[in-house]
Image (cartoon, rainbow, N blue to C red):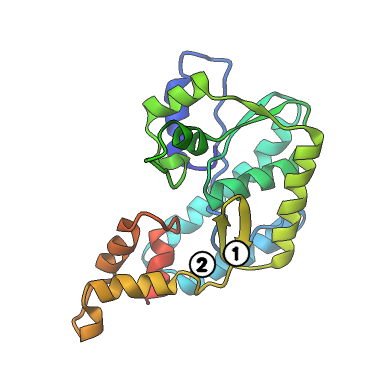
Amino acid sequence: AFDDSTAGSLKLMLRSKPGEIVVTLGDDLMVGPLPKDEDFSRSFAIRNEWFMERYSIGHADDRKLGMLQAAFAWLTWPEQLREVPCLVWAGDSASEQLGLRRLLSLIPDHHDVRLVNATSFLHKQNPNIWYRGTFEVTMDKLQNVLDTAEHVPLSPQDQAGYRADWQRILNEDGALRMLQGELLRTVPESYYDEDILQAAYRLEARHGFFKKSARIIGEVIGMGELTVSDSFIEYRVR
């Protein structure tokens, strides 16, 4: 899994199956310079500096600790996953799809890797509901996905395609990425500014009334269509 919420639910679901291990490969790859695994120390420093320069210093220590924990997981787990069957949970969010591509670049030509897209499966069951990512799916619905959804095997050709796409995104060397349909796109950091401004306008900020950034962040997230973090929205507000 590529986020703590999904991993926590899976651990509870699989607690009666001691042979199953849930691996969390966190870090929101949607935002910031991407880590380059062949030059990890340098790229981690660049990524951390990017966040330090742009995000609020209020939670800087916690953010760096989270990044270090994620970095350690990415450095250690893929090597251990090379020879064991893997079921990868990756929904229709930029962060998860980026995580999928990065993982497959670190376990090339895996002999038994399968993919589950919970958000797509549940949307097909109920077209009126769309999840922004697997992190929004409740545990009972994840259980339904585990029991009934197809676990799609990824052929060597499929894996090669994901690896090539990861390299493409690395080469684009951007700081913000979005998922448009099935295509991951690198976009300018200002990409969501218009949505943030519209949220501010709805809160009458354009008329000179002071509005706390938390209210604007809540308004943007409340629109339900943006998957960027509240920290990124706060950075763009400031």
Q: Are marks 1 and 2 in contact (CB under 8 Å)?
A: yes
**Place of residue 180 in the rendered image (x, y in percent of width and height, measured from the top left):** 56, 56
**Place of residue 35 in the rendered image (x, y in percent of width and height, measured from the top left):** 66, 57
Q: Which residue is mark 1?
A: 47
- At x 50%, y 74%, the residue is 190
Packing grade of label 2 (10 A; few <14, some 14-19, many >=20) is many
Q: Amino acid at mark 2?
A: Phe
**Place of residue 136 in the rendered image (x, y in percent of width and height, measured from the top left):** 39, 41
- At x 76%, y 39%, the residue is 159
Q: Which residue is mark 2?
A: 51
Q: Is residue 141 left or right of residue 188?
A: left
Q: Nearer the viewer, residue 32 or 116?
A: 116
How many marks on residues? Answer: 2
- Can you say whether 174 is above or below 166 in the image? below
Q: Amino acid at mark 1?
A: Arg
Furthest residue in direction front, as rendered: 127
Q: Nearer the viewer, residue 130 or 226?
A: 130
Q: Is residue 33 left or right of residue 146?
A: right
Alpha carbon separation for disc pair 1 and 2: 7 Å
Packing grade of label 1 (10 A; few <14, some 14-19, many >=20) is some
* Image quadrant in which the N terminus is located: top right
Check disc 1 and report its element: helix, strand or loop: helix
- At x 42%, y 24%, the residue is 12
Question: Can residue 47 be seen?
Answer: yes
